[in-house]
Amino acid sequence: MAASRPLFIPVILGTVRQGRLSEHAARFVHQEVSKRPGVETELIDIRELDLPATDEGNPVKDPRLTASVARADALILVVPEYNHGYPGSLKHALDSNLKEYIHKAVGICGVSAGPFGGTRAIENLLPVMRELGLVTIFWDVNFSSVHKVFDQAGQLADQSYVRRVDKFLKELIWMAKVLRHGRENVSLED
Amino acid sequence: MPDGRKMTCEDCGTEMNLHAEKVDWGTDSHAGEPFDEELGGVVEEFHTCPDCGTTEARVVL
């Protein structure tokens, strides 16, 4: 029955850069999502996807990414800020799907070496999310000065992020449930 | 406008729910498909299955 299906909320690591500290953030967020009852998740590393750079959009679909997004009730994007924007590699990956996103929730975690925690990358992503048909929540996670948030081994050093991610996930799960109900039961023509 | 016809889920056979429409302004992704002059593009509708959650898209004829 539909009511017993667990939510599926994958975490997308949105950069392919070597030495990325966003990977620590993505693994931590993924670990926190994994603890939620009734929620299944996976960590999607866009570096591992087969997305040729010789074309754009639907023609470069990676079947694994498409299957995960199609199954998803919500997405979590972990996004570093590069030159006040989000990575082009993330946009390339996101643009490869469309119908799979419609009326699904999305939460964004920004990552930066500086004090703003990827805020500008998040703000720049919002219109993209809207055009893809995703519905943004208004709780973000901002991994500011990320080199201080995680130790050299990638373990969480700043425990305040446990609560920050908890608040973020509560809203995202709420939105995911509401939108699943809407997609499956509320008709555009009613 | 939606054509009012319900879609049936190819995975489980359940009647699907129409919950979204979108105008595709692109000229290359829907070659030969019906162009809505009033809306300025090809209109797609999106249906989701209430039992298994599968989503399907189709062009509005």
Image (cartoon, coloured by chain):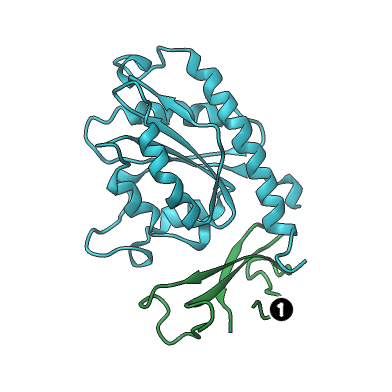
Q: Quadrant of residue A187?
A: bottom right
Tell which chain the image draws in green: B
Chain A on-screen colour: cyan
On the rendered image, what quadrant is the N terminus of chain B found in? Answer: bottom right
What residue is shown at x 44% (from left), y 50% (from top)?
A127
Q: Position of residue A151 (x, y in %)?
A: 33, 14
Q: Residue at x 38, y 26 (%)?
A: A117
Which chain is disc 1 placed on? B
Q: Is A190 left, or right, of A88 in this rendering? A: right
**Is B37 positioned to the left or the right of A6 in the image?**
left
Q: Residue at x 30, y 56 (%)?
A: A51
Q: Is residue A182 above or below residue A24?
A: below
| Residue at figure coordinates x 78%, y 66% from the top left | A190
In this view of the protein, which residue sits in the foreground, A40 or A24? Answer: A24
Q: Is residue A189 visible?
A: yes
User: What amino acid type should be assigned to the residue bearing mark 1?
Assistant: Gly
x then y, percent, for residue A59? 34, 67
Looking at the rendered image, the quarter that the C terminus of chain B falls into is bottom right
Residue of label 1: B4
> Total of numbered circles in the picture?
1
**A31 and A90: which one is in front?**
A90
In the picture shown, does residue A106 fall above or below B57? Answer: above
Which image quadrant for residue A28? top left
Q: Secondary structure at mark 1?
A: loop
**Residue B9: where, in percent of width, then height?**
66, 69
User: Which residue is situated farthest in the front direction here?
Assistant: B38
Q: Residue A154's spot in the image, x, y percent? A: 34, 20
Residue A44 in view: no
